[in-house]
Image (cartoon, rainbow, N blue to C red):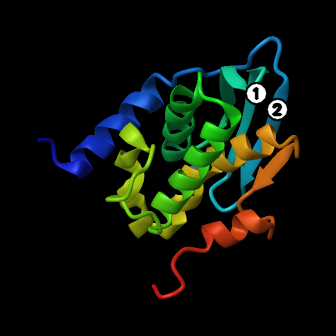
Amino acid sequence: MADPRALYQEVILDHNKKPRNFGSIAHASHHATGHNPLCGDHIEVSLHLGGDTIDDIAFEGESCAICKASASMMTVAVKGKTNSEAERLIEEFIAMTTGKLDMNSPNTVGRLKVFAGIAELPVRVKCAVLPWHTLHAALNATGSASTESGTASETLLAGPADS
Ligand code: ZN
C-alpha cells in the first residue's frame, strides 16, 4: 500500500499537470465563480443539469495546485451524479477536510479521501474546499462563492473549535 502522503502528492501533481474537465462547456445551465482571497485562487465552475443529473461539468481559472487538483477531482466525482448526490458529496468533502467527517462511517468520498490529511493544514483547506463551495453556489444559482464571505460556508471553513 502506498504511503497516504505520497499518494496525495502524486494525485495533486497528476491533476495539476493534466486537469480533467478543464475549460468551459457550451451549454451550461448553471455557473458560479469562486474566490479565495487568502491564496488568490479564482475559479469558475459551469455545468449542465439534464433533469436532475449533472451530465456535463467543467472548471477554469487561476489557482494553486491544491485548488486545481481538488476542482479536477471534483468534476470527475460529480459528473453523472444527481443534484442531491453532489450536495451530499460537497458536505462530506468539506467535513472531511475540516476534520469533522468520521471516515469509518458510511460516506461517498471515495478517491477524494486523499485530501483527508489537509485538515492539518488550515490555510490550504480553503484552497481545497473552494471548488466545492463554488459547485454548491452553481447548483443553487447563487452565482458566487468566497472563502471569506462570512456566509454559512465560512462556518464550515472555520475548522474544529477545539483545535
Ligand atoms: Zn490556493
Q: In this view, does 6 lie to the left or right of 108?
A: left
- At a point 82% along the width and 20% down the height, the residue shown is 28
Quarter holding the N terminus is top left
Quarter holding the C terminus is bottom left
Secondary structure under the numbered disc 2 in the rendered image: strand
Percent position (x, y) of residue 35?
74, 50
Q: Do the residues labelled 1 and 2 touch (CB within 8 Å)?
A: yes
- At a point 49% along the width and 46% down the height, the residue shown is 66
Amino acid residing under circle 1? Ser
**Which sits earlier in the primary sequence, circle 1 or circle 2?**
2
- At a point 48% along the width and 88% down the height, the residue shown is 162
Amino acid residing under circle 2? His
5 up-or-down from 47: above or below: below
Q: Distance between the residues labelled 1 and 2?
A: 4 Å
Percent position (x, y) of residue 59?
67, 29
Give the residue furthest to the bottom.
162
Q: In this view, does 14 lie to the left or right of 154?
A: left
Percent position (x, y) of residue 15?
44, 30
Which residue matches tag 2? 31
Which residue matches tag 1? 46
- At a point 73% along the width and 19% down the height, the residue shown is 24
Using the image, tell me which numbered label, if any, was put on residue 27: none
Give the residue furthest to the left.
1
39 up-or-down from 69: above or below: below
